[in-house]
Amino acid sequence: MDFHLTPEEEAFRAEVRAFLDENLPPGANTSDPAFLAEWNRKVRAKRWVGFSWPKEVGGGGATIMQQVILKEEMSKRKAPALGTCFMGLAWVGPAIIQYGTEAQKQRFIPDILDGKYQWCTGYSEPGSGSDLASLQCKCVREGDEYVVNGQKIWTSIAMWSKWIILLVRTDPNVAVKHDGITCLLVPMDTPGITVRPIKNMSGGAMFAEVFFDDVRVPVENRLGEEGQGWQVTISALAHERSSIAEVEGLKRKLEELKDLARRSTKNGRPALEDDGIRRRIARFEAKIEGMRFNGMRALTKQLKGEALGAETSVNKLLRAELEVALGEIALEMQGSAGHLEKEVDGGRWQKFALSWPEVVIGGGTPNIQKNIIAERVLGLPKD
Amino acid sequence: MNFGFTEEQDLLRQEVRKFLDAHCPLEEVRKLMETPEGFSRDLWKQMGELGWIGLTVAEAHGGAGLGWVDLTVVLEEMGRTLFPSPYLATTIAAAAIREAGSAEQQARWLPQLADGSKIASLAHLEPSDRWDLAGVALDAKPQGGGVTLNGAKVQVLDAPAADLFVVSYRSAGGVGLALVERNAAGVAVEATPSIDATRRVGRVRFDGVAVAADALLANASDAALGRVLDLATAAVTAEMLGAAEQDIRITVQYAKEREQFGHPIGRFQGVKHPLAEMFVDVESAKSILYYAAWALDERDADAPRAVSLAKAYASEAFARVGVDAVQLHGGVGFTWEYDPHLYLKRSKWARPAFGDADFHYDRVIQFGEAK
């Protein structure tokens, strides 16, 4: 066990800090479009967008430790994201790098790195949520084209995306449902695609339903082989790294919560002086630190070249629990005003307390994560 | 960065596991539970010869000179089989002598502890039931360079078997530590049986016990005492997490074998999900504990907070595992024959030992405020 960094790693940390000192001074307006445009240009020039990707495709070719250090330092300073094409950077890009043709790489990867437009993800269907591999979106090949008919749901930012990475069923007569699925890359302006936003419980709309009515897709837009779609998806999602950014985010949230506890009163005293509140906050702190050190143990495995297995579900479960619980305690501390829309801090806690489902349900429900742990880690029989 | 055990530590774990499985499986633990002394002098002697009792004692004093990360490995294994022995007590007492004793005091006592020839224990908790230093009230009056002790200690680990006590006391100068031999005049030891028969504790009374100047630990500052308690807390946490992990394992095994409604009960989510939740908590508490142990060895400043986070989390997690393991076993879970009750009872000792969850959560918040 050794938590010290090598001199090279320390030097890289210093480089990141110096960059942040220069380009993210205290009080910088990180929502100003001009600032963001400049930020994006600079981090792109540093090759910190797609930092883990191979240099040949325009990535940074970074080691795992460099990625960790960069993420840590960026989160600590609440820096804007590295790159703007969220899903492109998270899994579309990695899938294209691993399974794409040379032409596909040249066509899509530079645009993802430059954040030219957004990608969205067409996986879930009305009848296929947690059981994703049961998906039914119909796809028939006609000459050099695929014809798609069906529906997707819970498609984040579909209304602002230029492309969709889509899973369709090309073969309904397979013995194993995971076979017969194919992955397509489809422009969202193709005739026959209809997007209908879903209003969520916090009043906004991040998700949408997407309908496909005789949508024709050139065969050259297929990613991987026909029937290989499940594999393409799984290996792309495996690029999800240990949860450093999430941990830093939760730590920040907890600090804000302590600040709220100082300003809120319970029984006539600051809530932070209430034993019950204090201990609940400390319990969150323990779980967040648990996540942090779980992440480091996972990272050690990765550094030794071992693959991460179902243990990543441990942190997913903890995160789900914390996202819900932090929102709950924030509203509880506001007492009877907890349900008022804009009374405290402009209503940001109310928004927070209503937005956890995006994280908690979106990444696989907690019950599914528990099944994964019980079956793949503890070895209990499959349901 | 490396957050894993070394090959030597993995090997140590294997050796300890092999030894315990061969010489003290649960059937043997059950036999020892029924004996007056509660542990095997023969195994104690063998462990002394293997160098495990002196694991964290400096080589100069006959120990192996290893750290708290290595100790964690050993204690996790002892927790796994609820191994009954004065190992924890003697290790903590040796750490107190190391942290607070002069070179002469260390040279005199540590070799006898390291080879197992003397069993020692930290006598700290008092009837006030406070683990922090403010709870120390045992009276020490000056007496010819030394002191005279009057008062009582409770929950003293392995008191019935101990030859030597490291006793926290309060004098005009604050809190200190005294070495008191069991056979000293005025010392009375009374066993206080626990529902956990694998663990022996006792009440120790000090009635006008004269302690010479050279038996008062020379460097027993509040900081040194605080560190001793942190080391002890981490050790207890390692042992309890080893036990919790095994209790989960036993229950998982049962859930694979026991069939109801035509299936192994482990197929039902009502059984699966609590097991997954317990695994998450034990695994996460372990991660914090490993860091705490490393920090105790290498990064002092981080240690107290990490220790408290680990103990608080582990206290709650093991308590739940203890209860749920019994429940998930159904009817047989509360028979004497099946093992879950042994772990449940251990969790009742471990939960408050060296501070319960509330005690340590309070400390965590205070550390945050002191920043």
Image (cartoon, grey):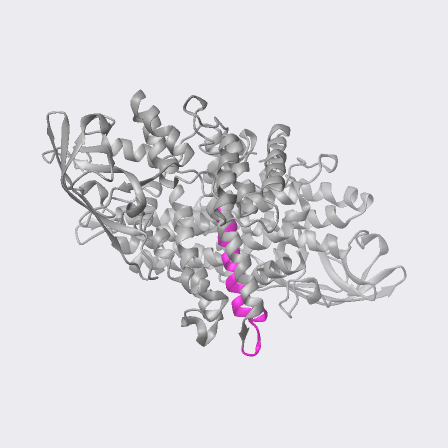
Q: Indicate yes or no whether the magenta region holds residue B94.
A: no
Question: Residue B93 placed where, x, y %?
Answer: 68, 50
**Residue B39 in sight:** no
> Compared to B213, does B3 lie above or below?
above
Residue at figure coordinates x 17%, y 37% from the top left? A177
Question: Along the line of sight, which residue is nearer the eye, B304 or B54?
Answer: B304
Is A279 within the magenta? yes
Q: Of B227 and B146, which appears nearest the observer?
A: B227
Image check: B333 left or right of A66?
A: left
Q: A383 or A83, which is in the foreground?
A: A83
Camera-nearest residue between B231 and A177:
A177
**Which stretch is magenta?**
A267-291
Is residue A252 positioned above or below B352 on the image? above
What is the residue that sits farthest to the right in this orientation?
A: B144
Q: Which residue is drawn at 40% across and 36% down?
A: A115
**Which residue is situated farthest in the front direction here?**
A34
Q: Is residue B340 visible?
A: yes
Q: In which quarter of the image is the C terminus of chain B?
A: bottom right
Q: Which is the main secondary structure of the residues drawn in magenta?
A: helix
Image spot of residue B3 (x, y percent): 54, 37
User: Where does residue B291 sit, x and y in percent of width and height?
Assistant: 57, 44
Quadrant of image for the N terminus of chain B: top right
